[in-house]
Amino acid sequence: MEYSFDIGPIRPPSEAYSLLIRATINCPWNRCKFCHTYKGERFQLRPVEEIKQDIKTAKAIQDNIIELSWKSGYGGRVKEVAGMVLNNLSNEAFRNVALWLYAGGKSAFLQDANTLIMKTDDLADVITFLKETLPSIDRVTSYARSKTAAKKKPEELKKLHEAGLSRLHIGLESGYDPLLQFMDKGVTAADHIKGGRNVVESGISLCEYVVLGLGGKKMWREHAIQTARVLNEIDPAFIRVRTMTINNRMPLYNELESSNFVRSTDEEIVEEEKLLIEHLECDSNYVSDHITNLLQEIEGKLPQDKGKMLAIIDRFQSLTPEERDNFIIGRRACMYTRLDDLDDTNKRQIVERVINRLGQGSEHVDDETIYSLMEGFI
Ligand code: SF4
């Protein structure tokens, strides 16, 4: 249990079972108004030898779990032992390795916010060492910024792909320049397109993240249309959507307080998502894998599933106002996962009681209460 290595604060939900290796620390930009993750923390590149030491420690933990499986009569069957020790560990690194082994030991995610900023040779060296040291890994992914991807030469990205970099996760957030500027994202739509195309053309799979509601009441329409335009030009393998949630650790909170930013309601964000999907003409997988999304069942492969996805929005918008209110509160109180849950009489009655309590006797819950419920998600 003395083995340990540093683990960063976040990874994408799709990397929940990945081995987490912190190749860089914090975010080199760190100015986006809607993001609190690394605020107040200084970005650091790590020496390659230090990262390799963490990989060696992960290997030592793996060996330790294998040894434990022999000693405890599991004959080297790692999954069973990893699953057993998982819930009894206070050591975060040991726990991460156990979880990774439990899931098959195939995937690794390089943290933190923009690993691509490392020198290409150094990053390729780290990925090669990772795959040599832990040969069960057949998928290596990381976060990157569009600006950094736009600056990399095509041959550099190809080199990283050949070293084993399988996927990059990029926060596109929006394709609308005035909104990107307002949010201090530090990139333009043109940077997003160049960076995204560079990644796609290198053979590295690309996942672009979009924030629904980012434009607020003022810019929602342009946000939806221009984001679709940029995504169409990039044609990433995956588009993942998240819904804007604000807390007081974000610079955006001050804009909200001074009324420079006015939030969209859930119903307005559904209209925005409809506009976004209507304008998408790429071949991407549209994924809604975040609890902040009201209609998390809107998922599919574009373009063939577009009609099916829009039909979910039509169904929501065709509900009575009372049913829509009920569904919104049911989602925000984590009672519902999909529209069909409205047919569950038990759940619906519980949600009615929640509405009554939150609305203090009225049948309507105000927007501020809904926003504060959402804050609990981040
Ligand atoms: S680049 Fe990403 S991690 Fe850095 S501040 Fe912006 S959203 Fe946050």
Image (tube, helix red, strand yellow):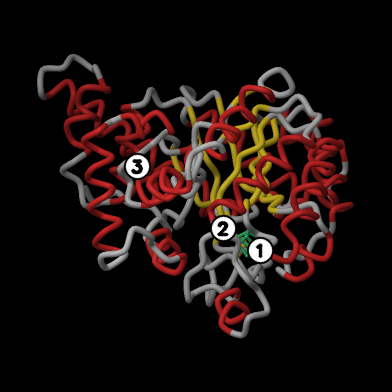
Q: State the residue in front, 106 or 242.
A: 242
Dot 2 falls on a residue whose secondary structure is loop
Determine whether the residue tagged by mark 3 lies in a helix, strand or loop: helix
In this view, which residue lies farthest toward the left? 72
Bin the neighbour count of mark 1 within 10 Å (Cα to Cα): few under 14, some 14-19, many 20 and up: many
- Residue depth check, mark 2 versus mark 1: number of the one nearer the observer: 1
Instruction: Please say if 319 is above or below 264.
Output: above
Question: Element type at marker 1?
Answer: helix
Task: Name the residue carrying label 3.
Answer: 96
Residue 181: percent from left, percent from top: 79, 68
Instruction: Name the foreground residue: 51 vs 334.
Output: 334
Dot 2 or dot 3, earlier in sequence: 3
Residue 186, given in percent of the width and then of the height, sits at 77, 65
Label 1 sits on residue: 216
Question: Residue under circle 2?
Answer: 244
Residue at image coords 63%, 69% = 30
Q: Amino acid at mark 2?
A: Met
Q: Quadrant of residue 280?
A: top right
Residue 18: horizontal and vertical position, in percent?
45, 36
